[in-house]
């Protein structure tokens, strides 16, 4: 397979979500089209799109543009030892699109090309993103969390440190727990606190409300501080969304800094990279819960396929509030309901993008 064309799209959703999306469309020499998505960090979207173009131009020179060959022969040339999350996000977009093409050409869902399928059903947690509801009150947040559980979600994630001081954050957790009941898993994201001692204090204060995990107590690159926090609290620690590169995740595991890794599914470099991280985590007895601050289309499909072949996949991230906007540009061709994603038999990723709707967003 060779690549005939690579096109990029920047969909600005900031008026509605204060979040934007970057997609790519790759067409193979036989006319098969594959779709990819990049982890679009705010204010870096156009730069990431340029990375996609640069990587795409190099990929077009390959006589074998398989995902494996792209990873082996293009990413390494392009980053020249200076890997960044923006570059790995762009690489993810292309690699995911190549898997989509390969699946369509072979008549198989991507998961069946990745390895032995262990579970086609992935439980999702609803991220109650504070950026979709500026300045929301605790009561409003609790109401939203309760409402989402009525749609079948059995896990919700909140950001209690949006409420200060710590006593207010604890009150936030208390109200949400009361609203969702004891059976719903409550995930807490600390959004990288500046001080490890304060992170420990917060975790202990939240413990009575039975959180399912404590995410990013400090910034992910502060591995020693993360390990210090984990050694002093009785909650599972999660990290990984801000980083790329297998060496980082190996260091996190070697230092005992986390129980669960959450690299972004289209930020870490591609599905092959995600699966390597998962295998590494499994060797340390750790779980993987892919981060997915992306659209509800391509990235979610990629996440479901990757998790289908990961024995240590725990749960996947999903943003229900993004559905109405993202639905204008594409739909999933497998079941996503009741807080779960079930990969079907559709060849490729199982996502259908609306090229007419995206046309005005090409850059």
Image (cartoon, rainbow, N blue to C red):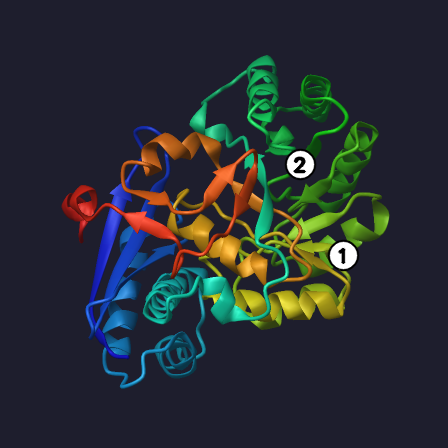
Could you say where residue 100 lies in the image, as x and y percent from the top left?
A: 36, 63
Decide if residue 247 is on the left or right side of residue 303: right
Relative to 77, residue 16 above or below: above
Task: Determine if residue 183 is in view.
Answer: yes
Residue 227: image tag: 1
Q: Quadrant of residue 261?
A: bottom right
Residue positioned 83% across, 44% down in the render: 233
Relative to 91, residue 188 above or below: above
* Classed neighbour count for the residue bearing mark 2: other residues with Cα under 10 Å, few (<14), some (14–19), many (≥20): many
Q: Which residue is mark 2?
A: 188
Residue positioned 67% across, 70% down in the render: 280
Decide if residue 333 is on the left or right side of residue 355: right
Q: Quadrant of residue 26?
A: bottom left
Q: Are marks 2 and 1 in contact (CB under 8 Å)?
A: no
Which is nearer the eye, 168 or 137? 137
Decide if residue 18 is on the left or right side of residue 319: left
Which is nearer the eye, 334 or 130? 334
Residue positioned 53% across, 44% down in the render: 341
Sequence-first tag of 2 and 1: 2
Could you say where residue 213 lies in the image, as x and y percent from the top left?
A: 72, 42
Q: Considering the numbered disc 2 on the image, is that residue within a helix, a strand or a loop?
A: strand
Decide if residue 202 is on the left or right side of residue 262: right
Which quadrant of the rendered structure holds the N terminus? bottom left
Relative to 32, residue 121 above or below: above
Could you say where residue 6 lies in the image, as x and y percent from the top left?
A: 22, 65
Task: Determine if residue 265 is in view.
Answer: no
Q: Considering the numbered disc 1 on the image, is that residue within a helix, a strand or a loop?
A: helix
Quote the CA–CA distance across marks 2 and 1: 18 Å
Residue positioned 48% across, 70% down in the render: 113
Which is nearer the eye, 216 or 302? 302
Could you say where residue 127 lies in the image, as x and y percent from the top left?
A: 55, 35
Residue 337: image tag: none
């Amino acid at each position: 397979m060779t690549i005939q064309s690579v096109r990029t799209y920047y969909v600005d959703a900031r008026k509605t979500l204060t979040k934007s999306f970057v997609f790519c469309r790759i067409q193979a020499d036989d006319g098969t089209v594959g779709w990819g998505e990049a982890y679009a960090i705010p204010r870096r979207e156009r730069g990431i799109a340029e990375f996609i173009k640069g990587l795409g131009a190099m990929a077009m020179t390959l006589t074998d543009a398989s995902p494996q060959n792209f990873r082996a022969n293009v990413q390494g040339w392009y980053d020249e030892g200076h890997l960044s999350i923006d570059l790995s996000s762009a690489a993810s977009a292309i690699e995911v699109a190549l898997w989509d093409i390969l699946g369509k050409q072979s008549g198989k869902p991507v998961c069946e090309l990745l390895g032995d399928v262990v579970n086609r059903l992935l439980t999702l947690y609803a991220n109650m993103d504070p950026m979709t509801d500026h300045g929301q009150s605790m009561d409003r947040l609790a109401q939203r969390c309760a409402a989402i559980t009525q749609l079948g979600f059995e896990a919700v994630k909140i950001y209690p440190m949006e409420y200060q001081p710590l006593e207010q954050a604890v009150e936030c957790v208390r109200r949400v727990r009361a609203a969702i009941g004891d059976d719903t898993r409550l995930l807490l994201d600390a959004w990288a606190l500046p001080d490890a001692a304060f992170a420990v204090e917060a975790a202990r204060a939240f413990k009575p409300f039975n959180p399912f995990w404590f995410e990013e107590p400090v910034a992910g690159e502060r591995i020693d501080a993360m390990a210090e926090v984990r050694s002093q609290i009785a909650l599972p620690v999660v990290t990984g969304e801000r980083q790329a590169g297998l060496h980082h995740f190996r260091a996190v595991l070697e230092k005992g800094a986390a129980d669960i890794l959450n690299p972004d599914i289209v930020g870490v470099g591609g599905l092959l990279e995600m699966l390597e991280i998962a295998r590494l985590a499994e060797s340390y007895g750790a779980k993987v819960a892919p981060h997915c601050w992306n659209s509800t289309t391509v990235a979610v499909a990629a996440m479901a396929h990757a998790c289908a072949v990961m024995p240590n996949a725990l749960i996947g991230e999903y943003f229900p509030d993004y559905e109405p906007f993202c639905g204008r540009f594409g739909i999933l061709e497998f079941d996503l309901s009741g807080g779960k994603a079930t990969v079907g038999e559709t060849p490729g990723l199982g996502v259908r993008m609306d090229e007419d709707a995206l046309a005005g967003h090409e850059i």
